[in-house]
Amino acid sequence: MTEKQQSGAETRDRLIDAAAETVRSQGYAGTSARAIAKAAGVNSALVFYHFGGVDPLLLAALDRSSEQRMAAYRQAVQKAGNLEELVETASAIYRADLEGGHITLFSELVGASIARPELRSEITSRAEPWIEFIEQALDRVIGGSPLARLLPPRDLAYAAITFYLGVNLFTHLDADRTRTQALFDLAERVAPRARLLTMRVPGRRRPPREGDRPDGTAPAR
Amino acid sequence: MTEKQQSGAETRDRLIDAAAETVRSQGYAGTSARAIAKAAGVNSALVFYHFGGVDPLLLAALDRSSEQRMAAYRQAVQKAGNLEELVETASAIYRADLEGGHITLFSELVGASIARPELRSEITSRAEPWIEFIEQALDRVIGGSPLARLLPPRDLAYAAITFYLGVNLFTHLDADRTRTQALFDLAERVAPRARLLTMRVPGRRRPPREGDRPDGTAPAR
Amino acid sequence: MTEKQQSGAETRDRLIDAAAETVRSQGYAGTSARAIAKAAGVNSALVFYHFGGVDPLLLAALDRSSEQRMAAYRQAVQKAGNLEELVETASAIYRADLEGGHITLFSELVGASIARPELRSEITSRAEPWIEFIEQALDRVIGGSPLARLLPPRDLAYAAITFYLGVNLFTHLDADRTRTQALFDLAERVAPRARLLTMRVPGRRRPPREGDRPDGTAPAR
Amino acid sequence: MTEKQQSGAETRDRLIDAAAETVRSQGYAGTSARAIAKAAGVNSALVFYHFGGVDPLLLAALDRSSEQRMAAYRQAVQKAGNLEELVETASAIYRADLEGGHITLFSELVGASIARPELRSEITSRAEPWIEFIEQALDRVIGGSPLARLLPPRDLAYAAITFYLGVNLFTHLDADRTRTQALFDLAERVAPRARLLTMRVPGRRRPPREGDRPDGTAPAR
DNA sequence: TATGAATGAGCCTTCATTCAT
DNA sequence: TATGAATGAAGGCTCATTCAT
C-alpha cells in the first residue's frame, strides 16, 4: 500500500464519516455532495470520484454503521439468556445508538427511498440482515414457547424494526427525551410479564439440534 | 366565477391536495413549489401567494389531513367498547390511512423537521392532539385496570405514535405488504390476551365519576 | 366631488406619500409596487390603476415634493438680500430637506434614469425649473457684479445642483453627520468672502429693467 | 489551458470587468448576476462560485477600479505644484473618468447602500482612502496658507467628494455635456483666484519639516 | 374605485456532475 | 488521487402587470 493509496483510503474514510454525520444533523434533504465534502474537509468532486455520487456514499456510510452496530448488538444479545434480558440489553444499546444518530441514518435513507427508486432495493436488501438477526435472537430466547406460538419471532422482528424506525422519528416530537425514556421503560416493564409465557412445559422443550449455532446466528431462511 | 379567476378558495384547495399528494409520491425532498403547482395545475407563484411558501402549505395540508383522520378515528373509537375492539377498529382505519398516504405526510414532515428548525415546533404542536386523543381512547377502555397500572395509557400512547410513524417507513421495506399485514395481525392477536388484564377486580373497579365524559373525550391533563 | 372621488383622491395621496417614503428608506431598487402599496395600506393594483405603474407614481411623488420644496425655497430666498444671506437661508432649508429625504427622492430618480430611458426625459424636464430658479436667485444677489462675471449665475446653478445631488450621496459616507455639517459650515464661511466681490462699482450698477419680476422669478430663457 | 477551463483568474477578470460595465450601463438596479454573466460571456453561477454573490463582485470591481484610478490621480497630483495646477490636472483625469464610467460605479454603490445595510460599511471604508488622499493633496498645495485657514483641506476634501459624487448624477441631466463642461470650466476659473490666497506671508511660511514626505503622501491623521 | 387572484418572467442561489489539470 | 473551474438545471421567491369582480 503506497502513500497515495493510504491517503485515498483515508479520504474515503473521512467522506463516509462526514456523510453519516451530515445526514444525522441535516437530514437527507440537507445532505449534498458539497455539504459532505465540506464536513470532511475535502473537495466535493471526490464524492463522485470515490463513490460515484451522494447516494452510493450514503449507502457506504450505512454499511459501515450497520456493520459496527450489528457487531455490538450481536455481542450483547449473545449474553442475554431470556426475553427479559434480551429486551434489557437491546434497549441499552439502542438508546445509545439513538443518541449517536445511528438510527437516523437508516431511517432517513428509508424515507428517502420514496423518491429514489434506485435507492429502494439497496435499502431493502440492507434491512434484511437486521430482520434476520432480530428473528434469530428472539427465536433463541422464546423459540418453542407458548409466547412464540402467539407471537412468532419473525413477526416480532417486524415489530421491532417498526419500533426501531419509529422511535427515531418520535424523538423529534420529544425535545426533552422524557417521552422516549418512557417508551423504553414500557418495553422493559412488559418483558418480564411476557417472559412468563416463555416458560416451557417440561418435555415439550425444544431439544438442542445439530443446526444450532453457538454464536446465535442462524442459517438463511 | 370564470375559468381564469376561480374563487381562490378552490385554488387553495387544489394546492393543499396537490401538496399532500406530492409528498406522498415524492417525499419531502421531492416536494418543490413547482412540483406541487404542476400537480395542482396552477402557477407555482400561487404557492407563495396563498401560503407564503412550501412549508406553510405542507402544514396546511397536514392540518386538513389530520382533521379528517382525527374525525374518522374519533367516530370509530367511540364504538369500541373494549381494548380488543379498539385495536381492531383502529387497525382497520389505520390500514386504510396507510394506503391512502395520510401517515406519510405526517411522517415525512416529522423527518424533515430535522433540517428545518422552524418546522419543528409546528410539527410538535400538531402531534400533541394525537397523543392526547390516543391516551384518552386507551384510558376509556383500560383505565383503572391492572393493565393500565402496568402500561399507563399515556405511555401506551407514545408507543402507538411510535408505531404509527414507524409503520410508514416499514412499508418501504415491504414491497408486497405481507409484512405490514403480519404486523397488524400481530396487534390483533395480542389484544385479546391483553384484554384479560383489563378485567377489573370487583370492588376495585373504578366507579364512574362526575368528570367522565360520555363522548369519550377527556379533560386536558 | 362625490364620496368615491374623495376616497380616490385620498388613495392617490397616500400612494404618493408612501412612494416617496419607500424610495427614501429603500432606495429605488427596493421600491416595488407591492412595497409602496403596503406602506400605503392599499392594494398594489391601485398603483397601476391610479398611476399606470411604479415610475409614473414616483414622478408624481417627485412633482409633489418638488412643488412643496420649491415653494419653501422661493419664500426663503426672497428674503435674502445678498449672497451671504442667500447661502445661509438656502443652507438652512436644504439641511432640513436632507434630513426629510426630499433630496433622496430626486437623487434616486436621477440615478435610476440610467437604466430607464423613459424616465430620463421626465427627470430632465423636472430638473430644469430648479436650475432656472437657482440661476435667478443668484442673479438677483450677484447679477452685474464682478463676481458674476467670474462665476456666471447659470454656471453656479449647475454647481449648486451638483452639490445638491452629491450631498445626498455623501451623507451615506457620513454616519454621524459631522462631515455633512462641516460641508455646510464651509459654504457659509466662503460666502462672506465671495460677497466682497459683489460690491458693485457705483455707476456700473445694473439699473432695474422692465422685465424684472418683483417675486424673484424670471422668464424662461 | 483549454477553451473550457481557463485559468479561473481570467474568468474572474472578465466578471469584474463585466460587472463594472453593467453597473455603468444599467445602474445598480439593473445589475443582476445574469446580466453580468451575459456581458462576460460566462455562466451566471460563476458569479457565486468566484465571488459569493453580486454585491461582493461589485465591491471587487470597485476595488480594482479604485486602485487604478487612485494610481492615476496620485501620479498626476504629484506633478501639480500649486492649487491652480492641482485643479487643472485633477479636472482632466476626472473628466476622463466620468466618461469612462469609473465614477458611476462608486456613485451607484453609494446609492445602493441605502437599501443594503451590509454594503454600507464596505462602501464607507472604501471611501476613506479617497478622502485621505484628497486631503493630503490639498494640504500639500495650500497647507499653512491663509486659504487653508479659511478652507481646511479636510473640509475641502469632503466638498471634493461631494462634487465627485454629484457630477456623475448631474451628467444625467445634461445630455450634450455642455453643462458638465461649464462646471469644470468654472472650477478652473476659480482656482487661480483662490491661489492668490495661498501666497504665504514671508516669515510665516511653514518651513519644511522632518516628517514631510517627498512622495506627497501624508501620515495617518 | 378597489380587491384578490393569477401569470410568466426574472432573480439569487445551490446542486449534481463533468473535466482538464 | 485530488482540485478548481465550469455548466445547466432546478428551487425558492418577488415582481410588474392584468383581469374579473
Image (cartoon, coloured by chain):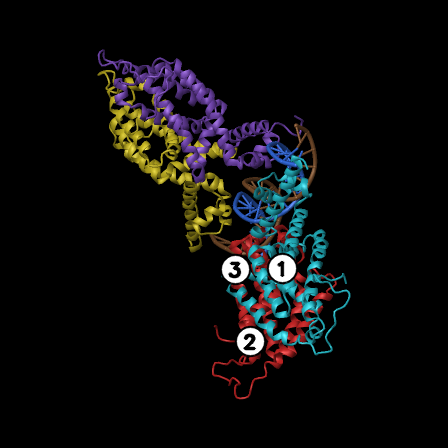
Chain colours: A cyan, B red, C yellow, D purple, E brown, F blue
The image quadrant that residue C190 belongs to is top left
Q: Which residue is mark 3?
A: B122
Q: Earlier in the sequence, mark 1 or mark 2?
A: 1
Q: For the point 30% across and 26% down, which residue is it? A: C212
Image location of residue B191, percent across then percent down? 64, 76
The answer to whether A45 is drawn above or below residue B138 in the figure is above
The answer to whether A160 is drawn above or below residue C56 in the figure is below
Residue nearer the viewer, C3 or B72: B72
* Numbered mark located on residue B20 in the image: 1
Image location of residue D126, percent across then percent down? 42, 30
Instruction: Please check whether the numbered discs 1 and 2 fall on a single chain.
Output: yes
Could you tell whether B205 is left or right of B4 in the image? left
Callout 3: few (<14), some (14-19), or many (20+) C-alpha neighbours within 10 Å? some
Residue nearer the viewer, A208 or C4: A208
**Alpha carbon distance from label 1 to label 2:** 39 Å
Q: Callout 1, which amino acid?
A: Ala
Q: Nearer the viewer, mark 3 or mark 2?
A: 2
Q: Earlier in the sequence, mark 3 or mark 2?
A: 3
Callout 2: few (<14), some (14-19), or many (20+) C-alpha neighbours within 10 Å? few
Q: Nearer the viewer, mark 1 or mark 3?
A: 3
* Element at label 1: helix
Q: Callout 3, which amino acid?
A: Glu
Image location of residue C118, percent across then percent down? 51, 34
